[in-house]
Image (cartoon, rainbow, N blue to C red):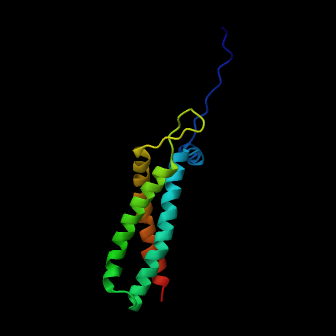
Amino acid sequence: MTEGPEREVRQRSEWEIRWRQARNAPPPVVRAVLANVAVAAVGGVVLLLTDWLASQGVLPAFVRDLGPFIYIAVVVVSGSLFTYLWVELPTGVPGEKRRSPWAAVLGFFASVPIVYLALVVIFEVLRPWLP
């Protein structure tokens, strides 16, 4: 067996490596992030509305205090559940679907930074614009 001339491998910069990783993200990770972002966005609108209603005196003040804690719990639990339902393990058999608790764990770990960023956007960016 004869080998051809060796090709020189070009070293990629750190930026090129990270850009390629971002463009080719694994589908389970993308699905986990999308599920959590969707839940966080809908829950964020509800949280912002209840906060505004509590500040107007329509709702009791304790709703304003408990709102972020309920929001965090709902996003973490429902994001994990939706990821569990949406992310399937490959089986190699067409039409056969398997679920794993690890998909829920993936959803949990995706929900933590998303909840943090959503709370920052809700309370530091959007809330000051409300009357």
Name the residue located 50 percent from the left edge and 68 percent from the top edge.
Answer: 41
**Farthest top residue?**
1
Q: Residue 38 at x, y = what percent?
A: 52, 63
* Residue 124 visible within the image: no
* 60 left or right of 86 in image: left
Name the residue located 52 percent from the left edge and 46 percent from the top edge.
Answer: 28
Name the residue located 41 percent from the left edge and 91 percent from the top edge.
Answer: 56
Q: Residue 104 at x, y = what percent?
A: 42, 50
Given residues 19 and 68, the one toward you in this image is 68
As drawn, 9 above or below 69: above
**Farthest bottom residue?**
57
Given residues 121 and 18, the one toward you in this image is 121
Q: Residue 86 at x, y = what percent?
A: 52, 51
* Residue 63 visible within the image: yes
Assign the N terminus to one quadrant of the image.
Answer: top right
As drawn, 118 above or below 96: below
**Farthest front residue?**
95
Q: Quadrant of residue 70?
A: bottom left
As drawn, 62 above or below 28: below
As drawn, 70 above or below 12: below
The image shows a total of numbered marks equal to 0
Q: Residue 14 at x, y = what percent?
A: 53, 44
